[in-house]
Amino acid sequence: MEFRLKKRARTEVKIEVVSLETKYPHNVMMYYYPPTDDIHIEEFEELAVERLRLLRVMDRAGSKGLRLLSEEWKEYVNAELTREGLRSYLRLCSPGGVSGQGSKHESEIQTRRRDYLSHFILRLAYCRSEDLTRWFVAREMELFKYKFAALSSAEVKQFLEANDFNFAPLTESQKDEVKDGLYESTAGQSVSKIELLDFYKVPFTQVLDLVRSRRCYLKEGFAYVNTHDLVSIVGTKQQDIIEQGLLASKGLIDEVEGDERISRMLKALHNSYTGKDYTVCRDAAVAIESLNQLSKTSMPLCMRMCHEHIRAQHHVKHGGRMQYGLFLKGIGVTLEDSIRFWREEFTKKMDADKFNRSYEYNIYHNYGKKGSMVNYTPYSCSKIIKEMAAPGDCHGCPYKSVDPATLKTKLASYGLSPSHIEEVMFFVTRGHYQIACGKYFMLTHNSNVEPTINHPNTYFEESQILMGNRQKRTAGSMPLKAKPRPDIKGHADRSMLNGDDDDELWKIAETQERAYQSQKDISEAFNDDLDLTEITF
C-alpha cells in the first residue's frame, strides 16, 4: 500500500496596513469612532496629561473673561500653548496647516493622532460625574471651535464632504438674489470681503443661536450662513457625539477599572498638577537669613502667612510644616539650612532634645534622606486649595479659607490700596483663587503682565525673574517633567542632575536602573501594551 501525505493548501493572510494619514486625514476631525491603536501604558498616561494641559489652557482663557475666538483670547491661548510646550497643537489651530511631504507633514500627522487618541482617553476620566462631564465638554468644544475657525473655505468644503454634511455653498447667481440681505446681516465685514465669503443655505432651526444674535439672513424658513459661522451647526453635532460617547464610556467604568495600571491615574487626573516639577531646585541656594525679606517681596500670600506665623508663634502644626517646608525645599533652601531654620524657631518654645526627637526626622524625610527615601514634591495650588484648615492652622489657601473681612485687613497691612484690594476680592468672591493670586502678584510687583499661577514655587520664581535675581529658562534648557516615575530602589532620577552635567553620568544611572528592573521587565513584557480595542469608549 502506498500512503501519501496530503498537504493542506496554505492560505496567505494579508494584513491591511492603514497609514496614519488615512486614519487621521484632517486637522479637525469628528470623534465618531474609538481608536483601534495599540499603545504602551506610558504613552497612554502621557497623552492623558498632555490633553489635560491643553484643555486647562482653554479653561484659563475663559476664567480671565476673554471672549471665545476674540483676538485677545487667541493671543492669550497661543502664548500659553507655547509656554506649555504644546506648539504642535497650536499648528492644528493655525490657518494654512502644513501639507505635502516632509518632516513637517509627518509631524502634523503625528499630532493629529495624539489629538484623536488623547480625546478618547480623557473620556474615560471625565465620564464619572456630571461636573466632570460638563467641564470636559465645554473645554473640548472651545478647542474644536478654535481649530474649525482656522480652516480656509476650501478646507471647510472638504470637511463638510468628509463628514456627510449635505451643505453646498451658494452659487454666484444664488448669492446675487439675496446679496442685500447678506450685506446687512454680516456684521464687521466690508462689502468686498462679503463677496469673497462662501454662504450656505440651511434650515433656520439648525442655527437658532445665530438667529437669536441676528448673525444670519433669514428668508422663507432658511438661514444664510457664512463659512465662519458654520461652526454653529458642525459644533452642535460634535457636541452631541462627545456627550453620547461619554454616556457609553460611563457604562463601562467597571471594566476599565479592572486594570489597576490606569484606574488610579484616571480617577486622580482632573485634580493632578501638570506644571513644572519643583522637587529639586536647579537654581542657586537660598539662605535662610534672607527668608524674612523674601517673604515680603517674592512669596505668595499662602507662604508669607505661614512664614509670619512661624516667626510669631515659633511653632506650626503638621499641615503647615509640610506646606511651607516643601516650598522652602523647592525654592532652594538646603537640607542643612532647613534643619537650622526649624530648630532655631522651635527651640524658642522647646528644648533641642524634644525638637530632635519629634521634628528633625520629618525634615530628613521630606528631602528623601530617611524612611521611604522619596524626594517629596512641593504642594501645587490645586492641592493647597483642597486643604481643609482648622482653627489655629496657617496652611491652605488664604483666598479660600480666610474670611473676607480678615483677608481685606491682611491685604491692607501688606500695602495694597482700597481699590487694589477690591480688584483682588473681585476674583476671591467668585471662587477664582488662583486668578486672585495672579492679580496680587501684578499689584505687588507693579507688573502689567498677569502670570499664570498654578504653584507657589512658580510665583516665587516669576517674582525673582522679574526682580532680576534669576534668569528665565528657555524651553529647551530644562524639559518639563510630564509625570512622576515610580519610586524604585536604585531608581535613576535625572532631575538630580543639573543641565550642564555630563551625559555619561546619566548613562551610568540608566544602566543601573535597567539592571535592577530587568527581571520585572521580562515578567511584564507581554502585559505592557494596552490594547485600546479592548475598551469600548
Image (cartoon, helix red, strand yellow):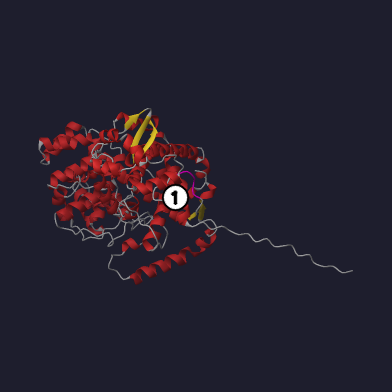
Q: How many marks?
A: 1
- In percent of width and height, residue 334 lies at 24, 58
Q: Nearer the viewer, residue 237 or 138?
A: 237
Q: Is residue 532 left or right of 434 when viewed as pictured?
A: right
Which secondary structure is most common in the magenta stretch? loop
Classify mark 1: residues with Cα within 10 Å, few (<14), some (14-19) or many (20+).
many
Which secondary structure, mark 1? helix
- In percent of width and height, residue 306 lies at 21, 44
The residue sitting at 15% across, 55% down in the picture is 289
What segment carries the magenta color?
31-35
Residue annotated with mark 1: 117
Label 1 sits on what residue type? Leu
On screen, residue 134 above or below 463: above
Q: Is residue 143 left or right of 161 when viewed as pictured?
A: left
| Quarter location, residue 131 | top left
- In percent of width and height, residue 42 lies at 44, 55
| Quarter location, residue 514 | bottom left
On screen, residue 300 above or below 508: above
The residue sitting at 42% across, 37% down in the picture is 237
Q: Is residue 439 left or right of 198 when viewed as pictured?
A: left
